[in-house]
Image: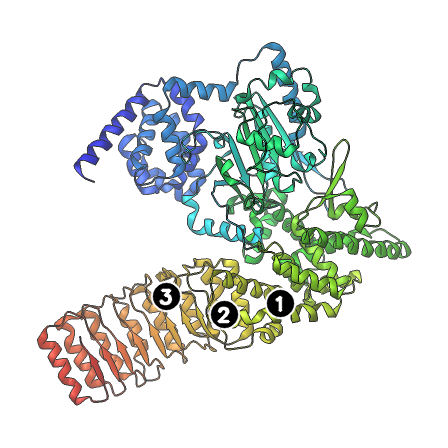
Amino acid sequence: MDGTSGENAEDNMRKFRQKLIAYEMHELRRMYEYFREDLVYIVEILHTQSFLAELKSRTTLNAEDYEKMKADLGASAFSEKLVKDVLEAGRQAVIGFFECLYSLHTNHPHHNLLAVLWEIENIEISTLEEQILVDEFGHSLDQEMKCIQDKHKQYLLEKTKTLVDCKPPRSSLERQSFPISERFVNLVVVSTDNFRPRTQHELIESGEKHESHLSKAQRGLERVSPKRLFRWCPQIKHVPHVVMVSGVPGVGKTTLMQKFVYDWVNGMFYQRFSFVFFFKFRELNQLKEKVSLEKMILHQFPYLSGKIEDILKNPEQLLFIFDGLDESCHQMDFASSPLYTNTRQKHDFGVILVNLLRQTLLKGCSVLITSRPAKLASIDADIFQLVCEVMGFFHEERKKYFEQFFDIEELALQAFTYVRDNEALYTFCYLPSYCWIICTVLSICSKFQQQNSNQAESFLPKTVTQLFVTFISNILTNHTQGSTVHSQKTEWEKAKKLLQDIGWLAEYGLMNHIIVFEKRDLNSFVEDTSLHLFTSFMVESSQDSYVNYSFLHLTVQEFMAALVHHIDYKPEKLQKALDKAKSFQDGRAEIFIRFLFGLSDRSTQALLKHLSLDFSKEVFKQIITWLQQLSPLLKKASKDAWERRETLNILNYLFESRNKELVLNILGQDLTFDFSRFHLTPLDCTVLAFILQSCNKSESLDLEKCYLETECWDRLSPSLHTVQTLRLNLNGLKDNDIPFISKPLAHPDCKIQNLSLTNNELTDVSCSSLASAIHQNHSLVSLDLTFNNLTGPHFRDLITALSRPTCSVKHLELCAVKLTHDDSQFLVSLGDNTNLEHLNASHNSITDAGSGYIKDLIKKSSSLKELRVAANGFSEVVVRELQALQSSHQDLQIVVW
């Protein structure tokens, strides 16, 4: 930093401090509480050492105690405690704390931090306090309007105070409900600008992005708590009025909106909104005729009649929430929709909404909309001033969900540990609805374990298909429990017919992008909806004059759509579904196809054998024929990102099938897998490991510049010994990652011949692990360690292993590994390796002091054919001496320049 910028920074800090000093303590406290959620998250994501060092210099708090505390409590609890302690420490501590944040914002320009500092810096004290007070206590209303508001809040309280759980499929109980304040688990919401068209199924893509955030980007995310949705936004430099909250099905958008309204009703935030109107698009779909905005509001909230005109006179005090844009059947044309300003004039609902969003109708009002991400690519995204994405649960939230679901702590931990170790299941646990299905299945498995302890392990689901098979199996089994043998048979025949009916309904919806069904849809597919079993699969949503239906979760719909092809085989329908599924550019049918293959697995089908379902063998033959038409893509040498994703989709189909013989038949051996410069998730690596093990031998695997996280290496490691050429360049590999590479090298059936580890972050510490593996290895022919930092005492261990007469390594690259003249003494022993033909030790710092060791190596080796030692700081005299050795070793090429 130059002197001028340093002076500016000091001047800015002085102004910032003066502004804080101008606050009375009660004002500081109110402001601090107003920002508390933000402050806790900011402390959590800031670099701990930098933050505590700065805090120590500006407050009397003991930074050393807090550093130890973070290790003991974890980041979240540590942040909560520190923020609490600062406030309790008094005025100077609060001022010092804000100064600390201000001083760090240049080097740590996180969006949440910048937003808080901007509000403090740029909003006048009186204005900021007024804003805080109005959000806390609301606007002053006359007595009559206050009574209407109280009535409105009471109505919304009744609508939002309980969460309704899905009906337990293992019982005949009604759907369960519980207080939302007790069972709501915080969802992670982040800002996003991602409106590109999707090429993958949105659950898969979001799951992969979610895991990426978990492993690498969590500190950089802009977290958007409900309290920040309508606060000053750094990106647009003002308070947003039109906000979009997106998220995949089942991630908790509707529950988040319910909690939002519940908290508003209870005065938790945003009392600046005197009235909040909460609508669901699936209910608004019933507005077939034109309607005015006033009539639309009164249809849902009839008790506002007589005061609606007065309520709408103050648009800045109104918030409209519309949930589920992707379920809307109304057309919304942002480009050519007519202007509309009269709240009493009738229009199509789409016109009303577009004008609310444009702010031509009720200028100054606020609008909050939720939608699936897939819908956003097809609309004018610029209309939204702030776009957020519900990420669902991170690790801690997932764990908390399991703890709440299972009454017994030991069972909760056991279930969570099982899922955590099963990447195929854990990836989708960011979805609350998926957590519910998994917990439901594992609770069933737990009861089964108590009754049949010797069979419990085989009963636990290992794939996503097996998870849903177990889920459905339990529903069907309990459906006929308690019936007589005769009635049981009759009930079961009805159940099988219903399975087929709702299966074809599910398939129709999937192929036509329908997730909400009307009564006429059911009448077209389902003969008997009166069966109690029907409500175990479908959720009914009823309003005053209509009813609609949806599956428990979109993935249940996708599973039922796949299952029906297996139990009611119609070759023409299956072929049409397969072809149509692959034609969807947004990949919406990928999970459906995975289920088709997963249900072909005999061990998976066996989970349903007690239900006498007839699985057609012809389905398996047809989907294999279809897959064989796609398989040439796997053998294509050059692939772009889309083709690599398609390759992984094919591998996922094979993974779900759990059929190693099928993998060999489709893929064969000696395949080349190239995923260089492509993001692979832990789930991708689980799938890839299964494929490599099934093939038994692959020609090469290129993972250059994939920057795989530790969990990825953990999942890949057991299969890497099957690969002949393994390229792991530019991966940021560290010493603690090397055991994942060493283990396959030491495998008794290791096939690795060529291993490249160039451009990583390995030090001499990794040499010991590599040395141990090479001692046990008989396949390695080429080892490339270029551009690492191997100088140090453990380098000797590696050279010792490579110097054995029985070592098979012929080609050794030690270029630019920072060797010194001390390290070069160990190179002499490489002359004992009678297989070594090529050694590259160029671009190191051996210098003249180590040149004697190079000469000794030349004299000692009987197998070397090429030795490269250029750019090692040799003097001209040494260079000439080394070149002179060329004449007496005619079979050896020595490269010094």
Q: CA distance from mark 3 to mark 2?
A: 18 Å
Q: Amino acid at mark 1?
A: Arg
719 and 408: which one is in front?
Answer: 719
Q: CA distance from mark 3 to mark 1?
A: 31 Å
Q: Which residue corresponds to mark 2? A: 719
Mark 2 Cα-neighbour bin, 10 Å: few <14, some 14–19, many ≥20: many
Q: Which residue corresponds to mark 3? A: 729
532 and 294: which one is in front?
Answer: 294
Q: CA distance from mark 1 to mark 2?
A: 16 Å
Q: Is residue 24 above or below residue 573?
A: above
Q: Residue furthest top?
A: 143
Where residue 131 sits in the image (x, y, percent)? Answer: 45, 21
Which of disc 2 and disc 3 is earlier in sequence? 2
Where residue 691 sits in the image (x, y, percent)? Answer: 54, 69
64 and 294: which one is in front?
Answer: 294
Which quadrant would residue 119 be assigned to in this image?
top left
Colour mapping used in the image: rainbow
Residue 658, which numbered label?
A: 1
Which of disc 1 and disc 3 is earlier in sequence? 1
Q: Is residue 552 above or below residue 702?
A: above
Q: Are marks 3 and 2 in contact (CB under 8 Å)?
A: no
Q: Secondary structure at mark 2?
A: helix
The structure residue drawn at horizontal position 63% and vertical position 44%, both measured from the top left corner, is: 405
Quarter in which the C terminus is drawn: bottom left
Mark 3 Cα-neighbour bin, 10 Å: few <14, some 14–19, many ≥20: many
Where residue 825 sits in the image (x, y, percent)? Answer: 20, 74
Q: Is residue 760 left or right of residue 561?
A: left
* Res 461 visible: no
The structure residue drawn at horizontal position 31% and vertical position 28%, both measured from the top left corner, is: 96
Which of disc 2 and disc 1 is earlier in sequence? 1
Where residue 183 sits in the image (x, y, percent)? Answer: 61, 37
